[in-house]
């Protein structure tokens, strides 16, 4: 495109988003990904992709939620040659424009050429979230009881946030289960209750005992729920916080997992949650009254 600005940032909000159908085309050109947003309207189309109209007048209050992808400057021409073809620029289905994001960064993005209908607007502002198939809440008892969830969640949290103090002794584990911060609800689980969970959890392959080598000292305990469920670090951190604090938004989860895993942004949290949802471990809930963001809840209990 003659005379185009040499901007190496791209705002994506649909099928090019991380974890979506066409992310593979963009991933090889990407050097970093951050959650971001922009003023405008995102809406459904007749195809299996969204459209967007971005605000250039400062009069639209709606936000389009997506990801800002930093591109390799050496490959930027090849990247846009490929993406322009994918997005139908030649056929005038989309056209590429420069916008200013809420972060203050300038970025390229693809805007649908046709005018949108307000009736097709996505109220959440996020195509990735709104089009993810949400499984129904299962009936009956889940994998874990409440006390098992609190014990395993506490072990995961301490393993990831304070590995120097891990594995935990029985006293430390009871204190972690009942601490007044980062727990909802706050509990008063007894040592006997925790001991029963440790014994059953070992039998079920959810945790392990670490006996002192010299015969002195105390037995300690470590979780293997992540191995049991075949979870990567990012998913393990999210599961731990959901077990310990109940339903939360993706933004809350990003903030509350910061000591356990460094998510690049809220969009990265959503991608991991979507993967967990497809495996039946979490489910998305409707926003609470007066809130715009969806909440997520674990399905292990």
Image (cartoon, rainbow, N blue to C red):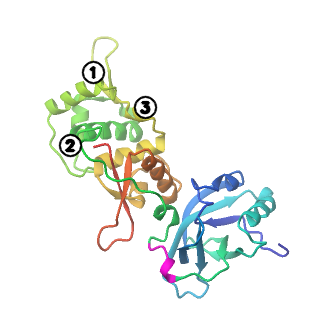
Numbered label tally: 3
Q: Is residue 111 visible?
A: yes
| Vertical arrangement, residue 270 with respect to residue 99, above or below | above
Instruction: Identify the image quadrant of the C terminus.
Output: top left
Q: Is residue 62 visible?
A: no
- Calculate the distance from the C-alpha at mark 3 to the C-alpha at mark 2: 25 Å
Q: Earlier in the sequence, mark 1 or mark 3?
A: 1
The residue segment tinted magenta is: 118-123
The residue shown at (23%, 24%) is 199
Residue 227: image tag: 3
Q: Which residue: 29% across, 52% down?
A: 246
For image coordinates 42% across by 60% down, the residue present is 251
Residue topped by disc 1? 219
Residue 152, image x, y percentages: 30, 37
The residue wearing badge 2 is 178
Q: What residue occupies the far right of the structure in this picture?
A: 2
Image-based side of 235 in relation to 156, left or right: right
Task: Pick whichever of labels 3 and 2 is earlier in the sequence.
Answer: 2
**Depicted 135 relative to depicted 91: above or below:** above
Side (left or right) of 40 relative to 170: right
| CB under 8 Å between discs 1 and 2 | no
**Could you tell me how far apart the alpha carbons at marks 1 and 3 are, in whole angstroms?**
21 Å
- State the separation of the CA atoms marked 1 and 2: 20 Å
Rendering quarter of residue 295:
bottom left
Residue 293: percent from the left, percent from the top?
39, 67
- Residue 243 on the magenta segment: no
Helix, strand or loop at label 1? It is loop
Observer-side mark, 3 or 2, equals: 3
SS for callout 3: helix
Q: Earlier in the sequence, mark 1 or mark 2?
A: 2
């Amino acid at each position: 495109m003659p005379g185009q600005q040499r901007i190496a940032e791209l705002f994506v909000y649909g099928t090019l988003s991380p974890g979506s159908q066409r992310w593979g085309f963009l991933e090889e050109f990407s050097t970093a990904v951050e959650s971001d947003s922009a003023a405008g309207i995102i809406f459904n189309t007749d195809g299996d992709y969204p459209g967007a109209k971005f605000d250039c007048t400062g009069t639209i209050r709606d936000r389009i939620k997506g990801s800002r992808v930093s591109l390799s400057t050496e490959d930027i021409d090849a990247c846009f040659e490929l993406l322009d073809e994918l997005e139908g620029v030649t056929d005038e289905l989309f056209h590429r424009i420069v916008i200013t994001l809420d972060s203050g960064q300038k970025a390229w993005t693809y805007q649908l050429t046709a005018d949108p209908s307000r009736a097709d607007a996505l109220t959440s502002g996020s195509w990735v979230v709104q089009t993810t198939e949400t499984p129904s809440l299962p009936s009956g008892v889940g994998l874990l009881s409440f006390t098992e969830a609190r014990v395993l969640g506490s072990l995961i949290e301490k393993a990831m946030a304070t590995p120097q103090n891990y594995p935990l002794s029985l006293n430390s584990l009871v204190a972690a289960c009942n601490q007044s911060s980062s727990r909802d609800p706050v509990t008063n689980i007894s040592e006997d209750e925790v001991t029963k969970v440790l014994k059953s959890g070992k039998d079920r392959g959810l945790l392990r005992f670490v006996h002192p080598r010299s015969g002195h000292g105390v037995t300690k305990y470590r979780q293997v729920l992540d191995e049991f469920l075949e979870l990567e670090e990012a998913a393990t951190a999210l599961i731990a916080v959901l077990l310990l604090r109940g339903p939360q938004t993706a933004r809350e989860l990003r903030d509350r997992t910061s000591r356990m895993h460094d998510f690049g942004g809220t969009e990265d949290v959503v991608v991991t949650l979507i993967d967990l949802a497809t495996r039946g471990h979490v489910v998305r809930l409707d926003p609470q009254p007066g809130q715009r963001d969806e909440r997520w809840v674990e399905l292990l209990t």
